[in-house]
Amino acid sequence: MRHVLLIEDEPNIIEALSFIFLRDGWKVDAHSDGANAVATTVQTAPNAIILDVMLPNRSGFDILEELRSLPDYKDVPILMLTARGQTKDRDIALARGASQYMTKPFSNAEVLKTMNALVGHAP
Amino acid sequence: MERSAFAGSRIRERRVALGLRQAEVALRAGISGSYLNLIEHNRRRIGGKVLLNIAAALEIEPGALAQGAEKRLLTSLRDAAIARPDVEVDLTQTEDFADRFTDWARLISAQQSQITALQQTVSSLSDRLAHDPFLSEALHEVLSTVSAIRSTASILAEPGEMDQNWQRRFQTNVFQDSIRLATASQSLADYLDGDSDRVLDALSPLDELDSLLAKQSYHFAELEELPDWDASVADALLTGASAAAKILGMEYFQQYWRDAQMFRLAELGALVGEFGLDPVRIARQTELSLPLIFRRLASLPPDPNRPPVGLMICDGSGALLFKQPCDDFQAPRVGSACALWPLYGALTQIGVAARHQILHSGRPGALGAQNLFDTFSIAERVTSASFESVPVLRSTMLILRAEKPSVGQPLPIGSTCRLCNVQACPARREPSIFTDGF
Protein backbone atom coordinates (compact mmCIF):
# COMPACT_ATOMS: atom_id res chain seq x y z
CA MET A 1 0.00 0.00 0.00
CA ARG A 2 1.16 3.50 -0.80
CA HIS A 3 1.77 5.27 2.48
CA VAL A 4 2.95 8.91 2.71
CA LEU A 5 4.12 10.86 5.74
CA LEU A 6 3.63 14.63 5.45
CA ILE A 7 6.21 16.50 7.55
CA GLU A 8 4.87 20.04 7.22
CA ASP A 9 4.06 22.77 9.73
CA GLU A 10 1.21 24.41 7.83
CA PRO A 11 -2.01 22.73 9.05
CA ASN A 12 -4.04 23.80 6.01
CA ILE A 13 -1.43 22.46 3.61
CA ILE A 14 -1.48 19.18 5.54
CA GLU A 15 -5.23 19.11 5.25
CA ALA A 16 -5.31 19.81 1.52
CA LEU A 17 -2.53 17.33 0.73
CA SER A 18 -4.11 14.71 2.99
CA PHE A 19 -7.33 15.08 1.06
CA ILE A 20 -5.80 14.57 -2.38
CA PHE A 21 -3.62 11.66 -1.27
CA LEU A 22 -6.47 9.92 0.59
CA ARG A 23 -8.69 10.38 -2.44
CA ASP A 24 -6.01 8.79 -4.60
CA GLY A 25 -5.91 5.73 -2.36
CA TRP A 26 -2.89 6.54 -0.21
CA LYS A 27 -2.60 6.03 3.50
CA VAL A 28 -1.62 9.38 5.01
CA ASP A 29 0.15 10.36 8.23
CA ALA A 30 1.18 13.85 9.18
CA HIS A 31 3.70 15.44 11.49
CA SER A 32 4.24 19.17 12.03
CA ASP A 33 7.37 19.60 14.15
CA GLY A 34 11.02 19.21 13.22
CA ALA A 35 12.27 18.02 16.60
CA ASN A 36 10.91 14.48 16.59
CA ALA A 37 10.17 14.04 12.91
CA VAL A 38 12.64 11.17 12.55
CA ALA A 39 11.06 9.28 15.46
CA THR A 40 7.59 9.73 13.93
CA THR A 41 8.91 8.48 10.59
CA VAL A 42 10.34 5.34 12.16
CA GLN A 43 7.13 4.82 14.11
CA THR A 44 4.74 5.26 11.16
CA ALA A 45 7.02 3.52 8.62
CA PRO A 46 5.82 5.28 5.44
CA ASN A 47 7.05 4.25 1.99
CA ALA A 48 7.17 7.88 0.80
CA ILE A 49 7.77 11.20 2.56
CA ILE A 50 6.99 14.83 1.83
CA LEU A 51 9.33 16.99 3.87
CA ASP A 52 9.23 20.77 4.39
CA VAL A 53 12.58 22.58 4.74
CA MET A 54 11.63 25.28 7.25
CA LEU A 55 10.14 23.48 10.23
CA PRO A 56 9.93 24.54 13.87
CA ASN A 57 12.89 23.36 15.97
CA ARG A 58 14.79 21.53 13.26
CA SER A 59 15.64 22.09 9.61
CA GLY A 60 14.20 19.73 6.99
CA PHE A 61 17.74 19.39 5.58
CA ASP A 62 18.96 17.93 8.89
CA ILE A 63 15.99 15.56 9.08
CA LEU A 64 16.67 14.44 5.52
CA GLU A 65 20.31 13.77 6.32
CA GLU A 66 19.45 11.72 9.40
CA LEU A 67 16.81 9.72 7.56
CA ARG A 68 19.27 8.88 4.80
CA SER A 69 21.71 7.60 7.40
CA LEU A 70 19.15 5.02 8.55
CA PRO A 71 19.36 1.79 6.55
CA ASP A 72 15.55 1.50 6.31
CA TYR A 73 15.22 5.01 4.86
CA LYS A 74 18.21 5.05 2.56
CA ASP A 75 16.04 4.58 -0.52
CA VAL A 76 12.58 5.72 0.58
CA PRO A 77 11.36 8.46 -1.81
CA ILE A 78 11.50 11.89 -0.18
CA LEU A 79 10.06 14.98 -1.83
CA MET A 80 11.36 18.25 -0.36
CA LEU A 81 8.62 20.87 -0.39
CA THR A 82 9.64 24.39 0.52
CA ALA A 83 9.01 28.09 0.16
CA ARG A 84 12.72 28.63 -0.34
CA GLY A 85 13.29 28.50 -4.07
CA GLN A 86 16.95 29.38 -4.20
CA THR A 87 19.22 27.22 -6.32
CA LYS A 88 21.46 26.76 -3.31
CA ASP A 89 18.66 25.11 -1.34
CA ARG A 90 17.78 22.77 -4.17
CA ASP A 91 21.43 21.77 -4.47
CA ILE A 92 21.64 21.13 -0.71
CA ALA A 93 18.47 19.02 -0.78
CA LEU A 94 19.62 16.89 -3.70
CA ALA A 95 23.13 16.56 -2.26
CA ARG A 96 21.72 15.26 1.02
CA GLY A 97 19.65 12.66 -0.75
CA ALA A 98 16.25 14.19 -1.61
CA SER A 99 14.53 12.27 -4.40
CA GLN A 100 12.83 15.40 -5.71
CA TYR A 101 12.60 19.08 -4.82
CA MET A 102 9.52 21.28 -5.30
CA THR A 103 8.92 24.92 -4.37
CA LYS A 104 5.82 26.51 -2.90
CA PRO A 105 3.31 27.45 -4.12
CA PHE A 106 2.92 24.02 -5.71
CA SER A 107 0.24 22.36 -7.76
CA ASN A 108 -1.66 19.51 -6.10
CA ALA A 109 -1.68 17.54 -9.33
CA GLU A 110 2.07 17.95 -9.72
CA VAL A 111 2.78 16.80 -6.16
CA LEU A 112 0.55 13.75 -6.57
CA LYS A 113 2.01 12.88 -9.95
CA THR A 114 5.58 13.20 -8.62
CA MET A 115 4.88 11.03 -5.58
CA ASN A 116 3.22 8.33 -7.64
CA ALA A 117 6.17 8.32 -10.00
CA LEU A 118 8.59 8.08 -7.08
CA VAL A 119 6.88 5.00 -5.64
CA GLY A 120 6.52 3.48 -9.10
CA HIS A 121 2.76 3.64 -9.16
CA ALA A 122 1.23 3.85 -12.64
CA PRO A 123 -1.63 6.37 -12.95
CA MET B 1 56.07 61.16 -26.73
CA GLU B 2 52.82 62.27 -28.28
CA ARG B 3 50.13 63.29 -25.88
CA SER B 4 46.45 63.06 -26.37
CA ALA B 5 44.57 65.80 -28.13
CA PHE B 6 42.14 65.12 -25.34
CA ALA B 7 44.11 67.63 -23.30
CA GLY B 8 42.55 70.35 -25.47
CA SER B 9 39.69 71.00 -23.08
CA ARG B 10 42.14 71.50 -20.25
CA ILE B 11 44.23 73.91 -22.34
CA ARG B 12 41.13 75.93 -23.08
CA GLU B 13 40.09 75.93 -19.41
CA ARG B 14 43.50 77.12 -18.33
CA ARG B 15 43.66 79.86 -21.00
CA VAL B 16 40.24 81.19 -20.08
CA ALA B 17 41.13 81.08 -16.39
CA LEU B 18 44.19 83.22 -17.11
CA GLY B 19 42.08 85.65 -19.15
CA LEU B 20 44.20 85.15 -22.27
CA ARG B 21 43.03 85.24 -25.85
CA GLN B 22 43.74 82.36 -28.22
CA ALA B 23 45.88 84.53 -30.47
CA GLU B 24 48.03 85.60 -27.55
CA VAL B 25 48.70 82.07 -26.35
CA ALA B 26 49.29 80.88 -29.92
CA LEU B 27 51.86 83.62 -30.42
CA ARG B 28 53.67 82.69 -27.20
CA ALA B 29 53.63 79.01 -28.17
CA GLY B 30 54.80 79.70 -31.70
CA ILE B 31 51.76 78.24 -33.46
CA SER B 32 48.90 79.72 -35.42
CA GLY B 33 45.66 80.78 -33.75
CA SER B 34 43.62 78.45 -35.94
CA TYR B 35 45.83 75.49 -34.96
CA LEU B 36 45.38 76.31 -31.26
CA ASN B 37 41.64 76.55 -31.88
CA LEU B 38 41.65 73.02 -33.34
CA ILE B 39 43.72 71.75 -30.39
CA GLU B 40 41.37 73.32 -27.86
CA HIS B 41 38.42 71.59 -29.49
CA ASN B 42 40.21 68.24 -29.33
CA ARG B 43 40.47 68.14 -33.09
CA ARG B 44 44.25 67.84 -33.22
CA ARG B 45 46.61 65.64 -31.28
CA ILE B 46 49.56 67.39 -29.71
CA GLY B 47 52.79 66.29 -28.16
CA GLY B 48 56.47 67.04 -27.82
CA LYS B 49 57.55 70.62 -28.35
CA VAL B 50 54.08 72.01 -29.12
CA LEU B 51 52.74 70.66 -25.84
CA LEU B 52 55.73 72.02 -23.93
CA ASN B 53 55.36 75.44 -25.59
CA ILE B 54 51.64 75.65 -24.85
CA ALA B 55 52.24 74.54 -21.26
CA ALA B 56 54.93 77.22 -20.90
CA ALA B 57 52.61 79.83 -22.42
CA LEU B 58 49.95 78.85 -19.91
CA GLU B 59 52.44 78.63 -17.04
CA ILE B 60 51.45 75.08 -16.17
CA GLU B 61 53.21 71.71 -15.92
CA PRO B 62 52.80 69.78 -19.20
CA GLY B 63 51.75 66.68 -17.25
CA ALA B 64 48.83 68.55 -15.71
CA LEU B 65 47.25 68.97 -19.13
CA ALA B 66 46.35 65.31 -19.29
CA GLN B 67 45.21 64.89 -15.71
CA GLY B 68 41.88 65.30 -13.98
CA ALA B 69 38.58 64.55 -15.65
CA GLU B 70 40.19 63.19 -18.83
CA LYS B 71 42.28 60.72 -16.87
CA ARG B 72 39.22 59.59 -14.96
CA LEU B 73 37.36 59.14 -18.23
CA LEU B 74 40.14 56.95 -19.65
CA THR B 75 40.18 54.88 -16.44
CA SER B 76 36.43 54.52 -16.61
CA LEU B 77 36.61 53.34 -20.24
CA ARG B 78 39.26 50.76 -19.32
CA ASP B 79 37.11 49.60 -16.41
CA ALA B 80 34.14 49.22 -18.77
CA ALA B 81 36.26 47.05 -21.07
CA ILE B 82 37.65 44.93 -18.22
CA ALA B 83 34.15 44.37 -16.83
CA ARG B 84 33.19 42.55 -20.02
CA PRO B 85 35.99 40.07 -20.72
CA ASP B 86 33.67 38.31 -23.18
CA VAL B 87 33.85 41.35 -25.52
CA GLU B 88 37.22 41.77 -27.16
CA VAL B 89 38.50 45.32 -26.75
CA ASP B 90 41.97 46.58 -27.64
CA LEU B 91 42.85 48.57 -24.53
CA THR B 92 45.78 50.21 -26.29
CA GLN B 93 43.24 52.13 -28.37
CA THR B 94 41.39 53.59 -25.39
CA GLU B 95 42.99 56.99 -25.61
CA ASP B 96 42.60 57.14 -29.35
CA PHE B 97 38.91 56.25 -29.01
CA ALA B 98 38.39 58.95 -26.39
CA ASP B 99 40.14 61.46 -28.67
CA ARG B 100 38.07 60.71 -31.70
CA PHE B 101 34.70 60.08 -30.11
CA THR B 102 34.76 62.09 -26.90
CA ASP B 103 30.99 62.29 -26.48
CA TRP B 104 30.57 58.56 -27.03
CA ALA B 105 33.38 57.93 -24.56
CA ARG B 106 31.60 60.07 -21.98
CA LEU B 107 28.38 58.15 -22.61
CA ILE B 108 30.14 54.79 -22.06
CA SER B 109 31.76 56.17 -18.92
CA ALA B 110 28.39 57.39 -17.58
CA GLN B 111 26.82 54.02 -18.33
CA GLN B 112 29.70 52.25 -16.62
CA SER B 113 29.13 54.39 -13.51
CA GLN B 114 25.43 53.60 -13.64
CA ILE B 115 26.09 49.86 -14.01
CA THR B 116 28.46 49.94 -11.03
CA ALA B 117 25.86 51.79 -8.93
CA LEU B 118 23.16 49.30 -9.94
CA GLN B 119 25.43 46.37 -9.12
CA GLN B 120 25.98 47.82 -5.67
CA THR B 121 22.22 48.18 -5.16
CA VAL B 122 21.60 44.65 -6.40
CA SER B 123 24.27 43.24 -4.15
CA SER B 124 22.85 45.11 -1.15
CA LEU B 125 19.37 43.80 -1.87
CA SER B 126 20.70 40.31 -2.52
CA ASP B 127 22.54 40.32 0.80
CA ARG B 128 19.48 41.74 2.46
CA LEU B 129 17.25 38.95 1.19
CA ALA B 130 19.77 36.31 2.09
CA HIS B 131 20.56 37.51 5.59
CA ASP B 132 17.63 39.46 7.01
CA PRO B 133 15.74 37.08 9.28
CA PHE B 134 12.59 39.20 9.32
CA LEU B 135 12.40 39.48 5.56
CA SER B 136 13.16 35.81 5.08
CA GLU B 137 10.52 34.79 7.61
CA ALA B 138 7.93 37.21 6.20
CA LEU B 139 8.45 35.92 2.66
CA HIS B 140 8.25 32.36 3.92
CA GLU B 141 4.98 33.16 5.67
CA VAL B 142 3.51 34.73 2.53
CA LEU B 143 4.58 31.84 0.29
CA SER B 144 3.37 29.19 2.71
CA THR B 145 -0.01 30.86 3.06
CA VAL B 146 -0.34 31.29 -0.70
CA SER B 147 0.53 27.59 -1.08
CA ALA B 148 -2.17 26.59 1.37
CA ILE B 149 -4.74 28.78 -0.40
CA ARG B 150 -3.76 27.53 -3.84
CA SER B 151 -3.82 23.91 -2.78
CA THR B 152 -7.18 24.22 -1.01
CA ALA B 153 -8.77 26.41 -3.67
CA SER B 154 -7.77 24.01 -6.42
CA ILE B 155 -9.62 21.22 -4.59
CA LEU B 156 -12.70 23.41 -4.21
CA ALA B 157 -12.54 24.38 -7.88
CA GLU B 158 -12.53 20.80 -9.09
CA PRO B 159 -15.65 19.79 -10.98
CA GLY B 160 -18.05 17.34 -9.41
CA GLU B 161 -19.61 16.84 -6.03
CA MET B 162 -17.64 16.96 -2.79
CA ASP B 163 -18.52 15.78 0.66
CA GLN B 164 -20.26 18.67 2.44
CA ASN B 165 -18.05 18.38 5.55
CA TRP B 166 -14.83 18.55 3.53
CA GLN B 167 -16.21 21.42 1.48
CA ARG B 168 -17.10 23.48 4.57
CA ARG B 169 -13.75 22.72 6.10
CA PHE B 170 -11.85 23.83 3.01
CA GLN B 171 -13.93 26.98 2.67
CA THR B 172 -13.13 27.86 6.27
CA ASN B 173 -9.44 27.14 5.66
CA VAL B 174 -9.33 29.39 2.60
CA PHE B 175 -11.06 32.17 4.52
CA GLN B 176 -8.64 31.86 7.44
CA ASP B 177 -5.65 31.73 5.14
CA SER B 178 -6.84 34.78 3.20
CA ILE B 179 -6.86 36.76 6.46
CA ARG B 180 -3.41 35.41 7.31
CA LEU B 181 -2.13 36.36 3.87
CA ALA B 182 -3.53 39.88 4.16
CA THR B 183 -1.84 40.32 7.54
CA ALA B 184 1.48 38.89 6.37
CA SER B 185 1.45 41.02 3.20
CA GLN B 186 0.60 44.16 5.14
CA SER B 187 3.38 43.44 7.62
CA LEU B 188 5.85 42.98 4.79
CA ALA B 189 4.69 46.14 3.01
CA ASP B 190 4.92 48.16 6.24
CA TYR B 191 8.42 46.89 6.83
CA LEU B 192 9.64 47.71 3.33
CA ASP B 193 7.82 51.05 3.04
CA GLY B 194 8.03 52.49 6.52
CA ASP B 195 11.50 51.29 7.20
CA SER B 196 12.95 51.42 3.73
CA ASP B 197 15.97 53.49 4.73
CA ARG B 198 16.86 51.07 7.45
CA VAL B 199 16.45 48.17 5.03
CA LEU B 200 19.55 49.30 3.19
CA ASP B 201 21.30 51.43 5.75
CA ALA B 202 21.22 49.53 9.00
CA LEU B 203 21.43 45.79 9.09
CA SER B 204 22.62 45.39 12.65
CA PRO B 205 23.71 47.49 15.66
CA LEU B 206 27.25 47.36 14.28
CA ASP B 207 26.06 48.67 10.90
CA GLU B 208 24.07 51.35 12.66
CA LEU B 209 27.16 52.45 14.59
CA ASP B 210 29.25 52.32 11.40
CA SER B 211 26.78 54.62 9.71
CA LEU B 212 26.84 57.05 12.64
CA LEU B 213 30.65 57.12 12.78
CA ALA B 214 30.93 57.55 9.01
CA LYS B 215 28.64 60.59 9.13
CA GLN B 216 31.15 62.23 11.50
CA SER B 217 34.10 61.10 9.34
CA TYR B 218 35.34 58.99 12.28
CA HIS B 219 36.61 62.07 14.09
CA PHE B 220 35.10 63.33 17.36
CA ALA B 221 36.50 66.66 18.47
CA GLU B 222 34.33 66.46 21.62
CA LEU B 223 36.41 63.53 22.87
CA GLU B 224 39.83 64.79 21.83
CA GLU B 225 40.15 67.40 24.55
CA LEU B 226 37.97 65.77 27.20
CA PRO B 227 40.17 65.70 30.34
CA ASP B 228 38.16 62.97 32.13
CA TRP B 229 35.90 60.33 30.71
CA ASP B 230 32.33 61.64 30.61
CA ALA B 231 29.66 59.20 29.47
CA SER B 232 27.17 62.02 28.88
CA VAL B 233 29.38 63.43 26.10
CA ALA B 234 29.47 60.05 24.38
CA ASP B 235 25.76 59.61 24.99
CA ALA B 236 25.05 62.90 23.22
CA LEU B 237 27.04 61.67 20.22
CA LEU B 238 24.82 58.60 20.12
CA THR B 239 21.51 60.47 20.08
CA GLY B 240 18.93 58.59 18.03
CA ALA B 241 20.84 55.31 18.03
CA SER B 242 19.18 52.07 19.10
CA ALA B 243 19.93 50.65 22.55
CA ALA B 244 22.19 47.97 21.11
CA ALA B 245 24.09 50.45 18.93
CA LYS B 246 24.51 52.71 21.98
CA ILE B 247 26.21 49.91 23.91
CA LEU B 248 28.64 49.36 21.05
CA GLY B 249 29.07 53.10 20.59
CA MET B 250 29.87 53.65 24.25
CA GLU B 251 32.65 51.03 24.08
CA TYR B 252 33.98 52.58 20.88
CA PHE B 253 34.01 56.11 22.31
CA GLN B 254 35.73 54.98 25.52
CA GLN B 255 38.46 53.41 23.43
CA TYR B 256 38.63 56.56 21.31
CA TRP B 257 39.00 58.73 24.43
CA ARG B 258 41.72 56.46 25.90
CA ASP B 259 43.58 56.57 22.58
CA ALA B 260 43.29 60.37 22.45
CA GLN B 261 44.68 60.61 25.97
CA MET B 262 47.68 58.47 25.10
CA PHE B 263 48.38 60.07 21.75
CA ARG B 264 47.25 63.68 21.66
CA LEU B 265 45.87 65.14 18.48
CA ALA B 266 48.40 67.99 18.48
CA GLU B 267 51.32 65.54 18.64
CA LEU B 268 49.71 63.28 16.06
CA GLY B 269 49.12 66.24 13.72
CA ALA B 270 52.73 67.37 14.08
CA LEU B 271 54.09 63.90 13.32
CA VAL B 272 51.78 63.50 10.31
CA GLY B 273 52.99 66.89 9.12
CA GLU B 274 56.56 65.64 9.37
CA PHE B 275 56.27 62.02 8.24
CA GLY B 276 52.98 61.93 6.40
CA LEU B 277 50.62 59.00 7.08
CA ASP B 278 53.53 56.69 7.77
CA PRO B 279 52.74 54.47 10.77
CA VAL B 280 56.20 52.93 10.72
CA ARG B 281 58.02 56.21 11.22
CA ILE B 282 55.44 57.45 13.70
CA ALA B 283 55.87 54.23 15.70
CA ARG B 284 59.64 54.66 15.74
CA GLN B 285 59.26 58.21 16.95
CA THR B 286 56.61 57.63 19.62
CA GLU B 287 57.20 53.99 20.63
CA LEU B 288 53.45 53.65 20.99
CA SER B 289 51.72 50.39 20.05
CA LEU B 290 50.88 49.92 16.38
CA PRO B 291 47.13 49.26 16.88
CA LEU B 292 46.90 52.55 18.81
CA ILE B 293 48.76 54.43 16.07
CA PHE B 294 46.53 52.82 13.41
CA ARG B 295 43.39 53.86 15.28
CA ARG B 296 44.65 57.41 15.78
CA LEU B 297 45.59 57.82 12.12
CA ALA B 298 42.10 56.63 11.21
CA SER B 299 40.54 59.23 13.50
CA LEU B 300 42.31 62.28 12.10
CA PRO B 301 40.02 65.21 11.36
CA PRO B 302 38.84 65.34 7.73
CA ASP B 303 41.26 67.12 5.43
CA PRO B 304 40.68 67.26 1.66
CA ASN B 305 44.42 67.58 1.09
CA ARG B 306 45.22 64.37 2.94
CA PRO B 307 44.74 60.92 1.41
CA PRO B 308 41.90 58.86 2.91
CA VAL B 309 42.63 56.40 5.70
CA GLY B 310 40.80 53.11 6.26
CA LEU B 311 40.81 50.82 9.26
CA MET B 312 39.50 47.29 9.72
CA ILE B 313 39.44 45.40 13.00
CA CYS B 314 38.41 41.79 13.45
CA ASP B 315 38.38 39.25 16.25
CA GLY B 316 39.89 35.77 16.24
CA SER B 317 36.90 34.35 14.39
CA GLY B 318 37.43 36.83 11.58
CA ALA B 319 34.24 38.75 12.38
CA LEU B 320 34.69 42.41 11.53
CA LEU B 321 34.27 44.65 14.56
CA PHE B 322 35.12 47.93 12.86
CA LYS B 323 34.84 48.84 9.21
CA GLN B 324 36.21 52.21 8.18
CA PRO B 325 36.54 52.21 4.39
CA CYS B 326 39.38 53.72 2.38
CA ASP B 327 37.69 54.86 -0.85
CA ASP B 328 36.81 51.72 -2.80
CA PHE B 329 38.37 49.44 -0.22
CA GLN B 330 35.25 48.67 1.71
CA ALA B 331 34.16 45.85 3.95
CA PRO B 332 31.12 43.84 2.91
CA ARG B 333 27.86 45.03 4.47
CA VAL B 334 27.04 41.51 5.55
CA GLY B 335 28.82 38.19 5.47
CA SER B 336 32.51 37.49 5.66
CA ALA B 337 35.20 39.55 4.00
CA CYS B 338 37.81 38.22 1.58
CA ALA B 339 39.93 35.58 3.34
CA LEU B 340 43.05 36.97 1.64
CA TRP B 341 43.01 40.26 3.54
CA PRO B 342 46.29 40.77 5.42
CA LEU B 343 44.06 41.50 8.44
CA TYR B 344 43.41 37.76 8.67
CA GLY B 345 46.97 36.79 7.83
CA ALA B 346 48.11 38.77 10.89
CA LEU B 347 46.07 36.42 13.11
CA THR B 348 48.47 33.62 12.29
CA GLN B 349 51.40 35.46 13.91
CA ILE B 350 50.27 37.37 16.97
CA GLY B 351 52.33 40.48 17.61
CA VAL B 352 54.11 40.41 14.26
CA ALA B 353 53.58 43.53 12.17
CA ALA B 354 53.02 42.96 8.46
CA ARG B 355 53.11 45.41 5.59
CA HIS B 356 51.61 44.56 2.20
CA GLN B 357 50.75 46.30 -0.97
CA ILE B 358 47.45 44.97 -2.24
CA LEU B 359 45.42 45.29 -5.41
CA HIS B 360 41.75 45.44 -4.56
CA SER B 361 40.10 43.66 -7.44
CA GLY B 362 36.74 42.78 -5.97
CA ARG B 363 34.22 44.46 -8.18
CA PRO B 364 34.05 44.30 -11.97
CA GLY B 365 35.09 47.55 -13.51
CA ALA B 366 37.10 48.63 -10.53
CA LEU B 367 40.50 47.38 -11.56
CA GLY B 368 43.43 49.66 -12.11
CA ALA B 369 46.08 51.65 -10.37
CA GLN B 370 43.47 53.51 -8.34
CA ASN B 371 42.85 50.32 -6.37
CA LEU B 372 46.38 49.86 -5.18
CA PHE B 373 46.64 50.15 -1.40
CA ASP B 374 49.29 49.82 1.29
CA THR B 375 48.15 47.89 4.34
CA PHE B 376 49.74 47.62 7.78
CA SER B 377 48.44 44.82 9.98
CA ILE B 378 49.06 43.43 13.41
CA ALA B 379 47.14 41.10 15.71
CA GLU B 380 47.28 41.18 19.49
CA ARG B 381 45.93 39.25 22.44
CA VAL B 382 43.21 41.13 24.30
CA THR B 383 43.14 38.58 27.11
CA SER B 384 46.14 36.66 28.32
CA ALA B 385 46.70 33.03 27.40
CA SER B 386 45.64 30.42 29.92
CA PHE B 387 44.69 26.75 30.06
CA GLU B 388 41.19 27.70 31.21
CA SER B 389 40.10 29.74 28.23
CA VAL B 390 40.85 30.60 24.64
CA PRO B 391 42.53 34.01 24.38
CA VAL B 392 40.53 36.80 22.78
CA LEU B 393 42.33 38.17 19.75
CA ARG B 394 42.08 41.42 17.82
CA SER B 395 43.64 42.09 14.46
CA THR B 396 43.92 45.65 13.19
CA MET B 397 44.69 46.72 9.63
CA LEU B 398 45.42 50.28 8.51
CA ILE B 399 44.68 50.97 4.84
CA LEU B 400 46.26 53.77 2.86
CA ARG B 401 46.21 54.56 -0.83
CA ALA B 402 49.51 53.44 -2.34
CA GLU B 403 51.60 56.39 -3.42
CA LYS B 404 53.66 54.23 -5.76
CA PRO B 405 53.73 50.56 -6.80
CA SER B 406 56.02 48.38 -4.71
CA VAL B 407 58.84 46.37 -6.24
CA GLY B 408 57.06 43.01 -5.97
CA GLN B 409 53.64 42.01 -7.20
CA PRO B 410 50.79 43.35 -5.07
CA LEU B 411 48.55 40.85 -3.28
CA PRO B 412 45.28 40.51 -5.17
CA ILE B 413 42.31 40.67 -2.80
CA GLY B 414 38.59 41.37 -2.99
CA SER B 415 35.77 42.53 -0.76
CA THR B 416 33.74 39.36 -0.37
CA CYS B 417 33.24 36.34 -2.61
CA ARG B 418 29.68 37.32 -3.56
CA LEU B 419 30.89 40.63 -4.98
CA CYS B 420 34.22 39.51 -6.40
CA ASN B 421 34.89 38.56 -9.99
CA VAL B 422 38.23 36.81 -9.51
CA GLN B 423 37.50 33.27 -10.64
CA ALA B 424 40.67 31.26 -10.00
CA CYS B 425 40.90 32.16 -6.33
CA PRO B 426 42.01 29.55 -3.79
CA ALA B 427 40.02 31.33 -1.07
CA ARG B 428 36.69 31.45 -2.93
CA ARG B 429 33.85 30.30 -0.65
CA GLU B 430 30.86 30.87 -2.89
CA PRO B 431 30.07 32.00 -6.45
CA SER B 432 29.96 35.67 -7.39
CA ILE B 433 26.63 37.26 -8.25
CA PHE B 434 28.36 39.16 -11.07
CA THR B 435 29.87 36.25 -12.91
CA ASP B 436 27.77 33.26 -11.87
CA GLY B 437 24.29 34.77 -11.70
CA PHE B 438 21.92 34.35 -8.82
Image (cartoon, coloured by chain):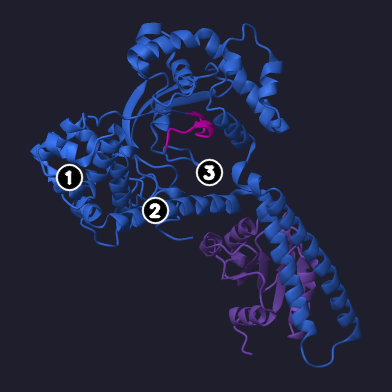
Chain colours: A purple, B blue
Does the magenta-highlighted stretch encompass residue B25? no
Quadrant (top left/top right/bottom left/bottom right) for the N terminus of chain B: top left
* For discs 3 and 2, the disc positioned in front in the rendered view: 2
Q: Which mark is residue B110?
A: 2
* For discs 1 and 3, the disc positioned in front in the rendered view: 1
Q: Is residue B258 left or right of residue A4?
A: left
Subunit ID for the residue under disc 3: B
Q: Nearer the viewer, residue B3 or B108?
A: B3
Does the magenta-highlighted stretch encompass residue B320? yes
Q: Residue at x 43, y 42 (%)?
A: B415
Q: Amino acid at mark 1?
A: Leu
Subunit ID for the residue under disc 2: B
Q: Residue at x 26, y 29 (%)?
A: B404
User: Picture coordinates of residue B369 (x, y %)?
Assistant: 29, 39
Q: Nearer the viewer, residue A110 or B262?
A: B262
- Vertical relation: B209 (above or below) B223: below
Q: Which mark is residue B335?
A: 3
**Residue B152 visible in the picture:** yes
Residues in magenta, as a range: B312-327
Q: Residue at x 72, y 31 (%)?
A: B243
* For discs 2 and 1, the disc positioned in front in the rendered view: 1
Count neighbours of disc 2 (C-alpha within 10 A) and say few if under 14, some if 14 to 19, many if 20 or more: some
Residue identifier under label 1: B36
